[in-house]
Image (spheres, rainbow, N blue to C red):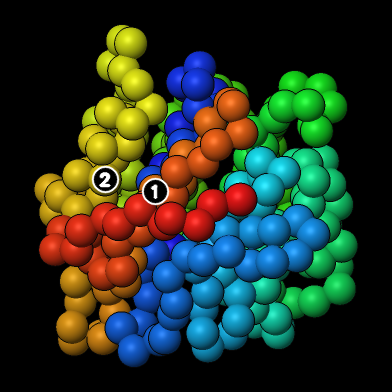
Amino acid sequence: MCTLTLGWRVFDDAPVAVAANRDELLGRPSEPPSVVDGDPAVVAPRDADAGGTWIGYNERGVLAAITNRWVDVPGGGERSRGLLVRDVLGAASTHEARGIVADAVAADAYDGFNLVVAERGGPTTPGDPTALYFEWDGDLRVRRLDPGVHVVVNVGIDGEYFELERDPDRGTEQAGNATRLREALRPAPDESAPAWRSRAADALGDHDFGVCVHDPDREFGTRSSSLFTLFADGAADVRFADGPPCETAFRRVESQV
């Protein structure tokens, strides 16, 4: 996934709202979101190649989503980043997820990633719910996100973007696209979570924002788009476009946990 937009504690009735595009090789097989039984049960798509996922949430109200980070990590790629997301989706809280990530990067070598973990909160989560942002480039950095709209791409988050040494123009372009997307998706006064989600879905497929990618020469592009909304009352709404959102309709995933 290369563009991840998080509305964190922006809407009173929906603490977690995510709209995200996954960019990948066009020939890499994947499966749409479904329920994965377990303790906890999880709703997530599946990378049919490595077996992991790039986004999902569990019945305890924890959501995890990842993007590649455009850095070279010595020895990276020993284990799939998607499997790390699967591990994190076993957590009961962001506190537990933080320990899972720290143990994972100590045990195995991963390529660079940006990972967001957010919890809905409620009776099963002690204290205030939190959202965490992890950066891995051979060193692990973790920060707690403030309430608001955040946009994560391959070169960073919320205006904190690094210059891509091997292709500076590409990194600068992506950073600019993310900044414009974040500005466009600032919630309007009294905007509801479903209304924001609809605007976010449109923006993910709007080529003026540059986040719906088509690159047939590299056999690469936006393969799918996901909308995850976790409501304060314990309900969830997951919608998935199994193709580039500029030409693929979002369909509601009927099975929720």
Residue situated in front as seen by the camera: 235 or 119 = 235
Q: Residue 106 at x, y = what percent? A: 86, 67
Q: Quadrant location of residue 182?
A: top left
Q: Residue 242 at x, y = what percent? A: 31, 69
Q: CA distance from mark 1 to mark 2?
A: 7 Å
Picture layout, residue 94 above or below residue 65: above
Residue 151 visible in the displayed image: yes
Residue situated in front as seen by the camera: 132 or 41 = 41
Q: Secondary structure at mark 1?
A: strand
Q: Answer whether labels 1 and 2 touch (C-beta < 8 Å).
A: yes
Residue 111 visible in the displayed image: no
Residue lying farthest to the top in this orientation? 189
Residue depicted at x 71% and y 84%: 78
Q: Earlier in the sequence, mark 1 or mark 2?
A: 2
Q: Secondary structure at mark 2?
A: helix
Residue depicted at x 52% and y 74%: 46
The residue type indicated by label 2 comes to Ala
Q: Which mark, residue 196?
A: none
Residue depicted at x 47% and y 39%: 229
The residue type indicated by label 1 comes to Leu
Q: Which residue is mark 2?
A: 201
Left or right: 10, with 62 as reference point? left
Left or right: 221, with 230 as reference point? left
Q: Which residue is mark 1?
A: 227
Left or right: 228, with 189 as reference point? right
Picture layout, residue 15 above or below residue 241: above
Q: Residue 148 at x, y = what percent? A: 48, 24
Q: In which quadrant of the rendered image does the N terminus lie? A: bottom left
